[in-house]
Amino acid sequence: MYDVAWPRHQPIALNYWNWDEIEKLELEHVAALRSIIWLWCGGSNGLEASRKDGSEEKPVEIFHIIERFCFGRRRLHLFGRDTSVRPGWLTIGPKLTSTNYDRESYNANFVKNPVVTRLVALKRYQRLRPKSPPRKIGHQM
C-alpha cells in the first residue's frame, strides 16, 4: 500500500507495503475491540478512478462512505495531508504541516458515554448498513 497516485507515464516505485507487512500491523493497539478498520488499497477502478492524473488525494467519496456507515467519533486518518484534514478525524502523516487536533475534544471521545462517542444514525443510513446474519440457536461452528 503506498499513498500516492501513480502517474501513468512513470514506472511504479517499489516502496509499497506488501500483504505480509499489512498483516503484521498491530491493529489491536489502535482499534477498540468492537470497531471497523478501513484499509484502502487503491486500484485502477472504482473510487480510484475519480482521482485526477498526478493527484495524491484520496477521493472525497471514501470519506463520505466511512462517515455515513461508521458512526463512532474516533476516526484516525493515517498518511493524511493538509488538504485531507477533516472535522471529526484525527489526521496524522509525514506530509502534514497543520492540524485541527484539540487534546480536550479528542480525549472526550474516549469517555465511556455512548452519547459522546457516537454520532446520531439516520434511519435511512441504518437500513443500508451491512448487518451480521442472526445467530442460529443451538448451531455450533
Image (cartoon, helix red, strand yellow):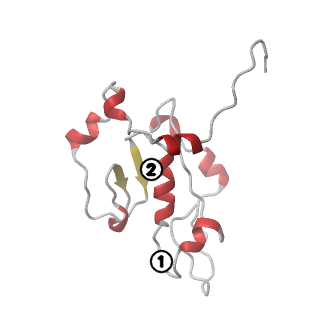
The residue carrying mark 1 is 55
Percent x, y of residue 63 = 46, 57
Is 89 positioned to the left or the right of 138 in the image?
Answer: left
Q: Residue at x 66, y 50 (%)?
A: 20
Q: Nearer the viewer, mark 2 or mark 1?
A: 2
Instruction: Say how many tags the image has.
Output: 2
The residue carrying mark 2 is 67
Question: Three-letter amino acid code at disc 1?
Answer: Ser
Q: Quadrant of the C terminus?
A: top right
Q: Residue at x 38, y 59 (%)?
A: 93
Question: Three-letter amino acid code at disc 2?
Answer: Glu
Q: Is residue 96 above or below residue 102?
A: below
Pick the front one: 38 or 69: 69
Q: Quadrant of the N terminus?
A: bottom right
Q: Quadrant of residue 48?
A: bottom right
Percent x, y of residue 69 = 51, 45
